[in-house]
Image (tube, grey):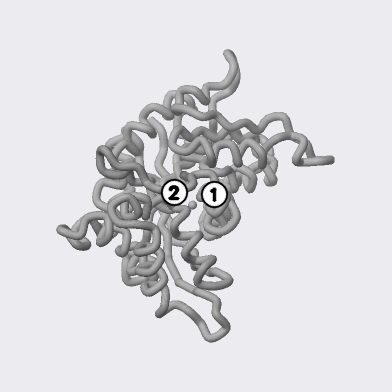
Amino acid sequence: MTPTLVRQQLPRPGTAPRVDQCARARDWAEIQERMLVPLYEAVYRRLDVGSGTRLLGLGCGSGLALLMAASRGAAVTGVDGSSPERTALARERLLPEGWGAHARADARVVEGAPEDAAGALGAPPYDVVTAFEPIGCLAGDSEGLGELLARATPLAGRGTPVVLAGWGPPERCATSTVLRVATKLADPLRGTGGWRLALRDDLEEVAQRAGLRPDGSGRVACPFGYANVDNAVRGLLSTGLFDAAIAATDPVQVNKELTEALHPYRRQDGTVWMPNVFRYLIARTP
């Protein structure tokens, strides 16, 4: 979960989503971002991220994945140019003062492009690069990712693992049926035409376009669980995927249809539970 669950979609030219981006960033950090914790943990275990690791997080969002890596002893740098509000939250989380007795001065967050995350002259290269924003739920949601990775590659050493993430098969992702509301409302004439099913080789194709060599993959269960429907609506809206729908219609209609789409996943105690599977790919720099 930028790290965002889906790459934020820009509204049509001449429109602006009527949303409070600061509030959305808070909802992301407090509700939605934690849904991908199993993915982060699985990747860090597999790559043995820990003391001595220099990790670069692309699209770091509000910084939870960075915080988890830092808690394992890694020196972390996050870079994100898509959401100043989320980047500000990441800085709050990673300030040395926030660590108390375990203060670290080797964590930083950069607002900008990958090359802006270059270390000081003579600093060792990064030995793990992550791009945890999952792709594979909208047409074109991987556009620009290959270029982003190619720009980050010079900051890493030869053979460095680069991690990409994507949605699993739709039949194993309950949330996919809910997210279709976004494209239906954003472009009623196309209906769900903007929806795109995840394909088996999505991540491999992105890696190859970036000049990376695939070197292993895995699947991780990442269920989306919420205290209630309102909590679920706020969390899903925080992904940014529904902003274009809000601009095309209005917040009331989006909230109404999203609430209706969540109904099948509401349990007797009022909680919302949607099982999902995400996939990750480990590729190597040349």
Task: Give the amino acid at mark 1.
Answer: Ala
Q: Secondary structure at mark 1?
A: helix
Question: Which residue appears farthest toward the bottom when viewing the image?
Answer: 268
Q: Quadrant of the C terminus?
A: top left
Q: Is residue 211 left or right of residue 31?
A: left
Q: Position of residue 144 (x, y in %)?
A: 31, 36
**Which residue is under mark 2?**
19
Which of 89/51 is in front?
89
Identified at 32% across, 71% down, the residue is 171
Q: Secondary structure at mark 2?
A: loop
Q: Within the image, what quadrant is residue 107 found in?
A: top right
Residue 13 in view, yes or no: yes
Task: Give the amino acid at mark 2.
Answer: Val
Which of 127/15 is in front?
15
Q: Position of residue 158 (x, y in %)?
A: 45, 28
Q: Is residue 225 left or right of residue 92?
A: left
